[in-house]
Image (cartoon, rainbow, N blue to C red):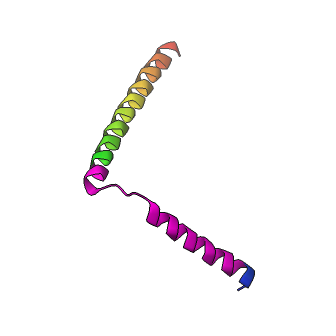
Amino acid sequence: MNNSFVQPFVHFLREAYAELRKVTWLSRKEAIASTIVILILVAIMAMFVSMTDLILSRILSIIL
């Protein structure tokens, strides 16, 4: 391998590792709570999109 590629890549990996150590990770409880909120919001959005699709398809079937 070319040394001009390896050294910057190793430097990047070291810097990335150093930055990851600075991250404040969520606790297990916070992660579960956030996941539940996201799943609820996704379900609400899915229902909204489904209802919108149903309504628009019925309107179009009446028109056409």
Give left or right: position of 8 versus 62: right
Q: Which residue is drawn at 71% across and 78% down?
A: 5
Residue 17, given in percent of the width and then of the height, sits at: 50, 70
Give above or below for 32 relative to 6.
above
Q: Residue at x 38, y 35 (%)?
A: 46
Give left or right: position of 10 versus 25: right
Q: Give the range drawn in magenta.
A: 5-32
Residue 39, given in percent of the width and then of the height, sits at: 32, 43
Q: Residue at x 42, y 30 (%)?
A: 49
Relative depth, front residue between 51 and 8: 8
Q: Which residue is drawn at 67% across and 80% down?
A: 7
* Residue 27 is a magenta residue: yes
Residue 28, given in percent of the width and then of the height, sits at: 27, 56
Residue 19, given in percent of the width and then of the height, sits at: 51, 64
Snapshot quadrant of residue 38: top left
Snapshot quadrant of residue 25: bottom left
Give left or right: position of 47 versus 9: left
How would you classify the magenta stretch by its main secondary structure?
helix
